[in-house]
Image: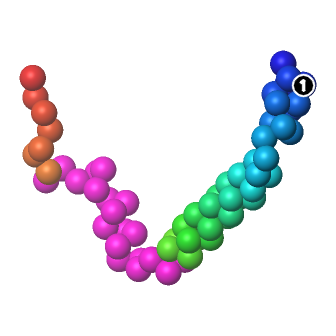
Amino acid sequence: MLKFAKNYMETISGIEIYPIISLLIFFTFFVILFWWVFTAKKDYIKTVSQLPLDNNNQNDIIS
């Protein structure tokens, strides 16, 4: 089955650009994510990390 897909994709002109574009999108996303993680303010990280433990929020749906 893989042999069929490989032979089929070799006949499509211009398909070699798609893996390059995918790699660039993947790499760019993670570079931006790492940049955001290292530059995020510590107060914001602490506030967000405490949200699941906050008992003051009474927005729970009770059936």
Q: Residue at x 37, y 68 (%)?
A: 46
Residue beneath disc 1: 3
Residue situated in front as seen by the camera: 19 or 55: 19
Q: Residue at x 45, y 77 (%)?
A: 40
Tell me the chief SS of the magenta region: helix
Give residue 53's position: percent from left, percent from top: 29, 51
Residue situated in front as seen by the camera: 42 or 38: 38
Q: Determine which quarter of the picture holds residue 21.
A: bottom right
Give residue 29's position: percent from left, percent from top: 58, 63
Secondary structure of the residue carrying tag 1 is helix
Q: Do we see residue 32 in this rendering?
A: yes
Q: Determine which quarter of the picture holds residue 44.
A: bottom left
Quarter of the figure with the N terminus: top right
Give residue 13's position: percent from left, percent from top: 79, 47
Give residue 42's position: percent from left, percent from top: 41, 77
Lateral position of residue 49 relative to residue 11, left or right: left
According to the image, what is the colour scheme of the structure?
rainbow
Quarter of the figure with the C terminus: top left
Lateral position of residue 21 relative to residue 52, left or right: right
Residue type at mark 1: give it. Answer: Lys
Residue situated in front as seen by the camera: 23 or 30: 23
Q: Determine which quarter of the picture holds residue 35.
A: bottom right
Q: Which residues are magenta?
A: 38-56
In magenta segment, residue 46: yes
